[in-house]
Image (spheres, helix red, strand yellow):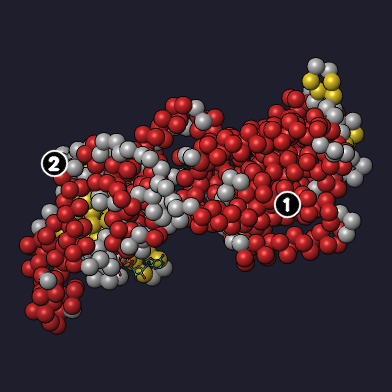
Amino acid sequence: MPGLHHALGVTGVVAALALVPLLPLNDFHLQILFTIGVNYLAAAGLNVLVGYAGQKSLGHAGLFAVGAYTAAIANVDWGINPWLSLVLACGFGAVFGLVIAMPSVRVSGPSLAMVTIGFGIVVEKIVTEWTDIFKGQAGLYGISAPSIFGRSFTNLHWVWFVGLLCIVTHLLLRSLLRGRYGRAFLAVQLAEPAAQSVGISVVRAKTLAFVISAVTCALAGAVVAQQNQYFNSDFITFNLSILFLVVVIFGGSGSLYGPLFGAVILTLLDAWLARWPALQHFTYGALLLFSLYLMPNGIAGALANLVKRSRSAQPPALSPERSLLLEQKRDRGTGPLLVVKDLYKAYGGIVPVRNVGFSISAGKVHALIGPNGAGKTTLLNLLSGHVAPNGGSIRFRDQEIAGEPPHRIAALGIARTFQNLKLFGDLSALDNVLLGAHLHVETSFLPSLLGLTASRRAERAARGQALALLTELGLGERAFEQAKSLPYGLQRRLEIARALASRPRLLLLDEPAAGLNPQETHELGEVIQRIQAAGITVLLIEHHMDLVMGISDHVLVLDYGEKIAEGAPDTIRQDPRVIAAYLGAEDETEAQIEVVA
Ligand code: ATP
């Protein structure tokens, strides 16, 4: 049904554009329609950055300037035809998007805001002061507008043209964001370490979002320069950057339709307030506060809530494919899968991992135990790449992985769960598992953007497999529920399902039984045994000794960052050093009871 609604919506917009000549509209009205389109174009890409990838930018007027000046200079100074100038403007926009992404993706919060503000100010200063090229306030004149069959665009043609650009932009972004790439952007926004653990490169995802936002913003600038046939530095102000951001946030960031609502309402408001310029800035500020406090998801979010309340949610029809778990690569009994030597990690004077060495045999369940603060989670973080070691070696399938970034380690076949759950809480259980399968959804950027059949087929297959995996872990019925609304025990299980979807050879589980009741802990033990039966090697950190002793083939004990024992569960149970580590050497009898229990 959403597909039908969308088709009707797009047809409605096309029909409305076709009817424009029949309406009693003057040039002023046509200019407002054109400006709505321009603001939509700028905001649609910015929405990918802000609403999906969770980044903020207060410098997109700079990218608008890149597009406008490229189109202007290419045409006026280099004599390039207007159509090609538009393409060039998008290309330069992409390049500058990359430039601004480089420092931006490495910082967050206030620093990110400062980097983007800095970019906007630098561009504003360059176009104002470097008059030889940009002509400052005097501006560039005589920019040619595109023409068709020798006929120049009238104001009506401009409305149609920008309307067409808006529709194409919407269709492309819709196709991109509803699949693998949209999920990856959201994952980066919702839980970066978890996104990395399923093989998503956070830097690459944020950079891509910057580039997409830069291209649509540059396109918006280029069409303004061409329609105006004149462009000067007065267009590029900090207020323009704020306007784009307010269009996104007030309209509803993270919704495909938010930028449309924002562009329509704010452009109309802007036109109405034009006679009281002092009120304009006040209004932007007030709207931003209003939307942040009362409608955190903007107009689109508020409307979506209304529609949800009036309709009972119908999960989309989807049939499970063959089980992924049973298709895992089998590693049973083929020697050591992972070999760790002299691994060392220090935080100042604290050394949570001190020259630790061990190996993990393929197809076995290994447990990592030790008292609180022994360094277990740090060791797991070193294996998954979430923490870089100060020294030592980690060889996984004969390949050195120490210090590699987590997304690359995930791609090699190491998946993990987290001690404090890191689910993508706002997404459905199914989307969480689909994100787990991110590296295995067989589509790339262009086919996803263009919505090619192969890309849609890959998405359908991945959804079917994700549902099969959820069903296999007893979550099939809850596939379309938001992850954060599931009971705690199921959330823990969902995190395991997400890790399994990445088709790992080695699964790292960090206290998977934490917070589970005895029945849930027992079921977890069965799940881990099924995972082992499928040929997946498991390394498990756990404090529940009955679970550890019941399912592990091999136990490794850490204390104060050092390995103090390893061996079969029965041997470890009796080991005096382990008993001493758990309750202190004074009362070994009591400690033995604790370890055995
Ligand atoms: P628990 O069973 O309580 O989860 P653990 O065995 O997993 O404990 P770690 O979380 O690895 O232990 O912590 C080991 C030690 O390293 C602790 O003293 C902890 O405070 C310290 N530590 C861990 N991460 C950091 C960090 N980023 N900066 C400073 N100290 C850290």
104 horizontally vs 341: left or right: right
| Closer mark to the observer between disc 2 and disc 1 | 1
Foreground: 547 or 571? 547
Q: What residue appears at the point 18 percent right and 64 percent down from the top-left corner?
A: 519
Above or below, comparing residue 372 to residue 181 in the picture: below
Residue 480 at x, y = what percent?
38, 50
579 horizontally vs 143: left or right: left
User: In this figure, which residue is indicated by the disc labeled 1?
Assistant: 265
Q: What residue type is labelled 2?
A: Gly
Q: Closer to the N terminus: mark 2 or mark 1?
A: 1
Q: Which picture quadrant has residue 153?
A: top right
* Quadrant of the frame with the C terminus: bottom left
Q: In which quarter of the image is ligand 1?
A: bottom left
Foreground: 238 or 168? 168
Mark-to-mark CA distance, 2 and 1? 64 Å
Foreground: 168 or 417? 168
Q: Which amino acid does label 1 sit on?
A: Ile
Residue 482 at x, y = what percent?
41, 55
Above or below, comparing residue 509 to residue 136 in the picture: below
Q: Which mark is residue 333?
A: 2
Element under disc 2 = loop
- Circle 2 crowding by C-alpha within 10 Å: few under 14, some 14–19, many from 20: few
Residue 432 in view of the camera: no
Cβ of mark 1 under 8 A from ligand 1:
no
Element under disc 1 = helix
> Which residue extends farthest top?
149
